[in-house]
Image (cartoon, helix red, strand yellow):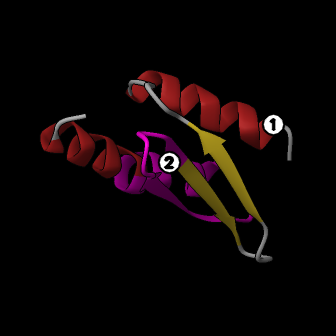
Amino acid sequence: MSMEAFEQKRQFITQELSRCITASHEGVTRLEFEYHDGGEESVIIRFDNGYIKTVNVTGDDCRAVMLDVLRALAEV
């Protein structure tokens, strides 16, 4: 992943998507983006009660990230 693509994905998750999800899902405080050695990418969903949900978004475009996060939230 190029640095530009990484930054675009990080910004989408931590700003735009995080703002939307925290407004629409009670208890969610923020979304974080992590890039791991080996190329794995994760969204960390943080809740106000301390619960954390990790979602694998490796290779996802913005639309797929959004769908994966919404699926994960439906399971909580």
Tell me: 71 left or right of 42: right
Instruction: Specify few, some or many for label 2: CA neighbours under 10 Å numbering under 14, 14-19, or 20 or more.
Output: few
Residue at far left of view: 4
- Give me the residue at 45% from left, 55% from top: 34
Which span is picked out in magenta? 14-42
Image location (x, y in percent) of residue 12: 34, 44
Return the residue at label 2: 20
Image location (x, y in percent) of residue 68: 62, 30
**Quick check: 70 above or below 3?**
above
- Give me the residue at 62% from left, 38% from top: 69
Residue 26 visible? The answer is: no
Q: Quadrant of the N terminus?
A: top left
Image location (x, y in percent) of residue 47: 71, 67
Image location (x, y in percent) of residue 24: 63, 49
**Quick check: 25 above or below 74?**
below
- Residue 48, by quadrant, is bottom right
Instruction: Specify few, some or many for label 1: CA neighbours under 10 Å numbering under 14, 14-19, or 20 or more.
Output: few
Return the residue at label 1: 74
Residue 61 visible? The answer is: yes
Residue at far right of view: 76
Name the amino acid, label 1.
Ala
Residue 61: assigned label = none
- Give me the residue at 44% from left, 23% from top: 63
Q: Is residue 30 shown in magenta?
A: yes
Q: Is residue 25 shown in magenta?
A: yes
**Quick check: 2 above or below 18?**
above
- Residue 8, by quadrant, is top left
Cα separation, mark 1 vs mark 2, equals 15 Å
- Residue 49, by quadrant, is bottom right
